Image: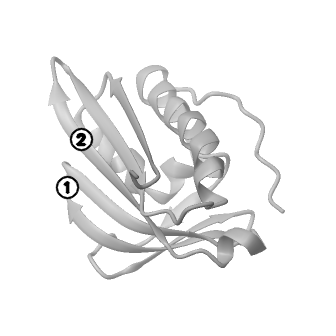
């Protein structure tokens, strides 16, 4: 049986450097990620917190960083009591220049069978990554409503 995972690939008309900035800059992440900001020094072993409106949504640890090519961090959703009890999963971003754009592949893996996090991120990542693509290509994020946190 294959292990549960989520993989999303898109092409964004930008440079790897601009995409890296968009993935790691606190203010920029707020602009396309439903008001969430990612806060870290982005060094391997460092903590990273995702917060929204002063509330911690996810607690993460930087696992790999190779600007502007590859970024990986653990992911533990802490705003939901069920997801908070799960083991951390792993998110990996691979940025590859491709014909005047950047091929971005996001892999989120390491879920236990029956994970509550997997269905949540399977809806969330496409929204976030579509908004990221939009803001980098047009200057405007998609106007989705913020999801309701439990």
Give the x, y percent position of residue 145. 78, 37
Residue 8: give x, y in percent of width and height.
41, 36
Q: Is residue 117 above or below residue 23?
A: below
Q: Is residue 47 above or below residue 39?
A: below
* Point 26% across, 76% down: residue: 44
Residue 76 occupies quadrant = bottom right
Q: Quadrant of the C terminus?
A: bottom right
Q: In the image, which is nearer the foreground, mark 1 or mark 2? A: 2
Q: Say what secondary structure mark 2 lies in.
A: strand
Q: Tell me if residue 41 can be seen.
A: no
Q: Is residue 36 left or right of residue 106?
A: right
Question: In which quarter of the view is residue 55 placed?
Answer: bottom right
Name the colouring of the figure: one colour
- Give the residue drawn at x 41%, y 55%: 3
Total number of numbered discs in the rendering:
2
Question: Circle 1 sits on which residue?
Answer: 67
Q: Earlier in the sequence, mark 1 or mark 2?
A: 1
Q: Is residue 3 above or below residue 74?
A: above
Q: Does residue 43 appear left or right of residue 33 in this picture? A: left
Q: CA distance from mark 1 to mark 2?
A: 9 Å
**Quadrant housing residue 25:** bottom left
Is 110 or 139 nearer to us in this picture?
Answer: 110
Front in this rendered view, residue 150 or 134? 150
The crowd level at tag 1 (other Cα within 10 Å; few <14, some 14-19, many 20+) is few
Q: Residue 140 vs residue 103: left or right?
A: right
Q: Position of residue 111 (x, y in %)?
A: 49, 62
Residue on which disc 2 sits: 95
């Amino acid at each position: 049986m294959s292990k549960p995972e989520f993989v999303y690939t898109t092409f964004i008309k930008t440079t790897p450097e601009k995409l890296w900035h968009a993935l790691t800059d606190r203010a920029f992440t707020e602009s396309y990620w439903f008001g969430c900001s990612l806060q870290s020094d982005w060094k391997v072993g460092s903590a990273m917190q995702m917060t929204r409106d002063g509330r911690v949504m996810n607690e993460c640890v930087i696992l790999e960083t190779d600007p502007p090519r590859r970024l990986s961090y653990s992911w533990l959703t802490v705003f939901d009591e069920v997801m908070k009890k799960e083991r951390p999963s792993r998110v990996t971003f691979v940025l590859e220049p491709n014909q005047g754009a950047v091929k971005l592949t996001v892999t989120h893996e390491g879920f236990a069978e029956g994970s509550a996090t997997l269905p949540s991120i399977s809806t969330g990542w496409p929204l976030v990554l579509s908004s990221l693509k939009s803001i980098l290509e047009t200057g405007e994020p998609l106007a989705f409503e913020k999801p309701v946190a439990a």
